[in-house]
Image: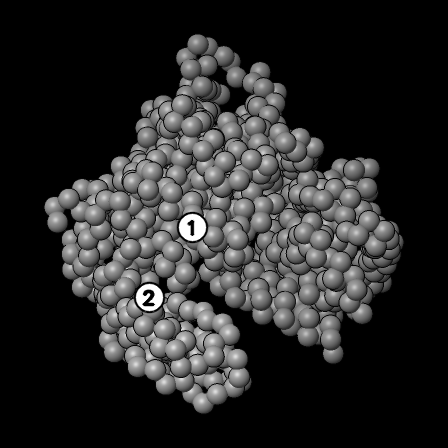
């Protein structure tokens, strides 16, 4: 694993929290925000980093970007020690902080980008080429001369992502990139990130609550809870471990008793419509043909598993 | 009662900034010390300057430091919220409330000033008493008159700040007028220098302008410069400016409401 | 440093999008300070000397201090708001950029609004200048004084703003030292007790902003009997205070990155 871009070994981060215990007295307690955390990310991977609120996601990202010093363990990003070589690392990474814009509120988008060109000392041709490309892909053309405060949430997010990518970072950290966006914007953004990964080989680390982001983008998922990994592997494996199921929705011509076919069980019946659950890693074909052979089917559709449920299941066990 | 509730809420809101309050008290005290020594040097040269003696002058310094935040001499307070709401257009909501907008903001500002009086008014005054020889009001009556003059001073200051905030209806950004207004308020209230030192017609003018009702008048009531009928006249002076300025506020609001309704914000 | 220049220039250009509001702010700050000086002038309508110094001599002190704090206040940009930056997460964003944090904070929201203050102070200084019997060395001392005053005030702004790394809403605390330092130096230090002068020499080097060098410009013996060589020590005081301020800044940033709050 020597060629890993991100190396995390037994990472620790504790905080001292002072709580008021009635009156003026305060008691200091130590909280382990990140505890015994280990994982590797090779270059070019797209990783989903998920977990419930307060699980230690943003603490991890802060340590990975050098904003926060770990209290223990080993951490290397691109061969650098983030907290020590923060400025050097900054040239090689891009960070998008979800709801908080990194853009300059009062300045037009174009001026914000211009500032970044200077801050990162991006060569003029690279800057122009990147800007042109992102403006086209993210449809920012008409917005370049609008002050950031007048942009909508989705427009601002596209601006923020452009801002984080102008200097060709090797790693892009995204925190809740699609929060608050409409379905179309979400789709476009995901498409863009996939293309970025494919064409530039940019490594992507995504923390999100929106599991569709993960489904659409990430080959690998790291689930963290109470500061430590509870799952690390491909999405399919997460489904298997979490006992996740896909659902076959069957619309019968007439109302009927619950369907009985091997490999699937009925979860819900509503008039002529029935919901049949089957393991996520099993093929739908035999079940579909079994249903079609014994019943008069008007329509069929398949629902993908709900990861949220899967993770809840994992938490329940971990 | 509604307005009391508004005032209480404003009081509580400002009470949440505790270290800001402590920092402010420290800063007020530093300035109090500096001005005290400067004035002592002045009164050492002219022991009767402006009719004050040295103790009056130093007392004036500390009272002023205590009042600065209470009367929000630099602006700030609830009128800043108003300016921001005008800029963002949210003021339209306020205009449709069944409660008078001016009364609403005045109640909130009085609540804020009560908090600032108890913290940033009281604390520097106590510091001043520890470090220097200060004058206390001569009689309970003088103390009472001073106490009455405080809410009046806040109201005069509020009315001026309200008018400044209302410029945002036409200019969108009230920062410029706010700075200009603060400059005039500092100078003509007696914050820069007691108005009693202002010579000739400049002194007459300064004493007639509304800003003198904010700092100079309450300070003089504390010092006992005005007693008996003069003290009542001083309160009357404050009231007169309140009537005139709040009248202007409601005229401006009427014009502004028309503008918001016609142009849709 | 080139980053500082580039970034500030962009902010200056951006401010010109709303020239009306910019002009009003410059005029406003000129008015505040102009009236402040009128206050000093009115004091002298009642007396001839303050602490043994005449109006023009006091004006010389006043102008020198005003120029120093005016330029310093311009150069520090958003340092005074560092607590807000911590609260809103803006500091985190700046920490992910490859430019030293202090440079970024100083360049952020850079504005030439303080031009009003600098101009006013320069006018007062120029008006007071005839009181000095100018020689080449005195011109040199005057120039060095203003540079040192700028650095000392810069250091006070930065150093005391660092407290906000610990308590984010205590921004006003620094004002006691920065604007307080400015106000102290508007008067001849003879109006204060000796203890104040000693503290402003050895604890906070505020007396080096204008007091010691102006004594040299005015050709006066030190009223407190302090050694005459102190009158040439402003640059030393500037370097020392700058070093301490940078140390405070480093400590503050280190505290922030090691506690995350």
Left or right of A121? Residue C181 is right
| Residue positioned most to the front | A293
Front residue of C254/B112: it is: C254
Q: What residue is disc 1 on?
A: A190
Left or right of A79? Residue C6 is right
Q: Is residue C212 visible?
A: no
Q: Secondary structure at mark 1?
A: helix
Q: Quadrant of the C terminus of chain A?
A: bottom left
| Residue positioned most to the left | A2
Question: Residue C166 sits in which quadrant?
Answer: bottom left
Total numbered badges shown on the rendered structure:
2
Disc 1: host chain? A
Question: Residue B7 sits in which quadrant?
Answer: bottom right
Q: Are marks 1 and 2 in contact (CB under 8 Å)?
A: no
Report crowding for label 2: few under 14, some 14 to 19, many 20 or more residues within 10 A (C-alpha). many
Scheme by which the image is coloured: one colour
Say whether disc 1 or disc 2 marks the residue closer to the N-terminus: 2
Q: Is residue A283 above or below residue A258?
A: above
Foreground label between 1 and 2:
1
Q: Is residue C55 above or below residue C190?
A: above
Disc 2: host chain? A
Say which residue appears at 57% left-offset and 23% top-offset: C122
| Residue positioned most to the bottom | A257
Q: What residue is disc 2 on?
A: A51
Say which residue appears at 58% left-offset and 38% top-offset: A143
Q: Position of residue B146 (x, y in %)?
A: 71, 64
Say which residue appears at 33% left-offset and 66% top-offset: A51
Say which residue appears at 25% left-offset and 78% top-offset: A317
Q: Secondary structure at mark 2?
A: loop
Front residue of B21/C224: it is: B21
Q: Position of residue C177 (x, y in %)?
A: 45, 44
Q: Position of residue B66 (x, y in %)?
A: 60, 57
């Amino acid at each position: 694993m020597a060629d890993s871009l991100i190396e995390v070994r037994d990472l620790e981060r504790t905080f001292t929290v002072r709580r008021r215990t009635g009156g003026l007295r305060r008691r200091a307690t130590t909280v382990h925000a990140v505890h015994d955390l280990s994982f590797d990310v090779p270059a070019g991977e797209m990783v989903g980093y998920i977990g419930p609120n307060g699980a230690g996601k943003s603490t991890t990202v802060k340590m990975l970007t050098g904003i926060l010093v770990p209290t223990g363990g080993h951490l290397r990003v691109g061969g650098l020690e983030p907290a020590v070589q923060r400025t050097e690392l900054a040239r090689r990474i891009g960070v998008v902080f979800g709801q908080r814009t990194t853009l300059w509120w009062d300045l037009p988008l174009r001026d914000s980008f211009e500032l970044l060109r200077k801050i990162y000392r991006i060569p003029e041709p690279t800057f122009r080429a990147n800007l042109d490309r992102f403006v086209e892909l993210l449809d920012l053309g008409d917005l370049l001369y609008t002050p950031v405060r007048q942009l909508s949430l989705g427009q601002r997010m596209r601006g923020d992502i452009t801002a984080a990518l102008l200097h060709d970072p090797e790693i892009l950290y995204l925190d809740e990139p699609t929060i608050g966006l409409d379905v179309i914007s979400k789709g476009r953004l995901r498409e863009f990130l996939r293309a970025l990964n494919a064409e530039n080989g940019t490594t992507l680390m995504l923390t999100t609550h929106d599991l569709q982001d993960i489904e659409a983008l990430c080959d690998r998922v790291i689930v963290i809870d109470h500061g430590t990994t509870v799952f690390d592997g491909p999405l399919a494996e997460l489904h298997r471990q979490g006992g996740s199921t896909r659902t076959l929705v069957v619309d019968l011509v007439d109302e009927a008793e619950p369907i009985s076919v091997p490999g699937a069980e009925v979860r819900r019946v509503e008039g002529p419509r029935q919901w049949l659950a089957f393991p996520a890693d099993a093929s739908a074909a035999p079940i579909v043909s079994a249903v079609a052979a014994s019943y008069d089917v008007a329509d069929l559709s398949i629902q993908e598993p709900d990861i949220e449920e899967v993770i809840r299941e994992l938490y329940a066990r971990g | 009662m509604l307005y009391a509730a508004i005032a209480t809420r404003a009081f509580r809101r400002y009470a949440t900034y505790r270290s800001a309050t402590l920092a402010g008290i420290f800063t007020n005290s530093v300035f109090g010390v500096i001005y005290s020594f400067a004035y002592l040097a002045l009164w050492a040269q002219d022991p009767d300057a402006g009719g004050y003696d040295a103790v009056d002058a130093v007392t004036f310094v500390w009272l002023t430091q205590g009042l600065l935040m209470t009367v929000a001499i630099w602006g700030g307070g609830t009128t800043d919220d108003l300016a921001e709401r005008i800029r963002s257009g949210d003021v339209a909501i306020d205009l449709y409330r069944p409660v008078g907008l001016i009364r609403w903001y005045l109640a909130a500002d009085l609540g804020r000033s009560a908090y600032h009086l108890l913290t940033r008014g009281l604390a520097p005054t106590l510091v001043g008493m520890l470090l220097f020889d200060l004058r206390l009001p001569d009689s309970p009556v003088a103390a009472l008159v001073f106490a009455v003059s405080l809410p009046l001073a806040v109201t005069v200051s509020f009315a001026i700040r309200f008018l400044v905030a209302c410029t945002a209806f036409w200019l969108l950004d009230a920062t410029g007028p706010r700075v200009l207004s603060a400059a005039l308020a500092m100078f003509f209230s007696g914050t820069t220098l007691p108005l009693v030192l202002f010579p000739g017609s400049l002194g007459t003018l300064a004493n007639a302008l509304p800003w003198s009702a904010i700092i100079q008048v309450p300070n003089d009531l504390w010092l006992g410069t005005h007693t008996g009928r003069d003290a009542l006249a001083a309160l009357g002076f404050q009231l007169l400016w309140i009537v005139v300025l709040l009248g202007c506020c409601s005229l401006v609001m009427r014009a502004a409401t028309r503008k918001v309704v016609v142009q849709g914000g | 440093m080139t980053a500082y220049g580039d970034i500030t220039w962009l902010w200056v250009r951006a401010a010109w999008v709303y020239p009306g509001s910019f002009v009003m702010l410059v005029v406003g700050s000129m008015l505040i300070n102009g009236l402040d000086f009128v206050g000093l002038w009115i004091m002298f309508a009642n007396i001839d000397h303050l602490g043994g110094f005449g109006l023009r001599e006091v004006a010389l002190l006043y102008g020198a201090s005003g120029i120093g704090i005016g330029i310093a206040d311009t150069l520090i940009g958003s340092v005074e708001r560092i607590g807000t930056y911590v609260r809103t997460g803006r500091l985190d964003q700046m920490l992910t950029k490859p430019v030293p944090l202090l440079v970024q904070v100083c360049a952020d929201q850079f504005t030439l609004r303080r031009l009003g203050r600098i101009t006013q102070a320069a006018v007062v200084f120029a008006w007071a200048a005839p009181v000095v019997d100018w020689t080449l060395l005195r011109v040199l001392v005057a120039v060095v004084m203003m540079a040192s005053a700028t650095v000392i005030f810069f250091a006070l702004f930065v150093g005391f703003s660092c407290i906000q790394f610990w308590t984010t809403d205590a921004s006003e605390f620094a004002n006691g030292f920065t604007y307080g330092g400015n106000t102290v130096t508007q008067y001849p230090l003879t109006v204060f007790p000796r203890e104040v002068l000693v503290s402003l020499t050895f604890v906070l080097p505020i007396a080096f902003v204008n007091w010691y060098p102006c004594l040299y410009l005015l050709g006066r013996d030190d009223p407190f009997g302090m050694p005459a060589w102190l009158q040439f020590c402003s640059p030393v005081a500037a370097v020392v205070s700058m070093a301490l301020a940078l140390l405070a800044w480093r400590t503050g940033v280190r505290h922030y990155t090691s506690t995350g709050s």
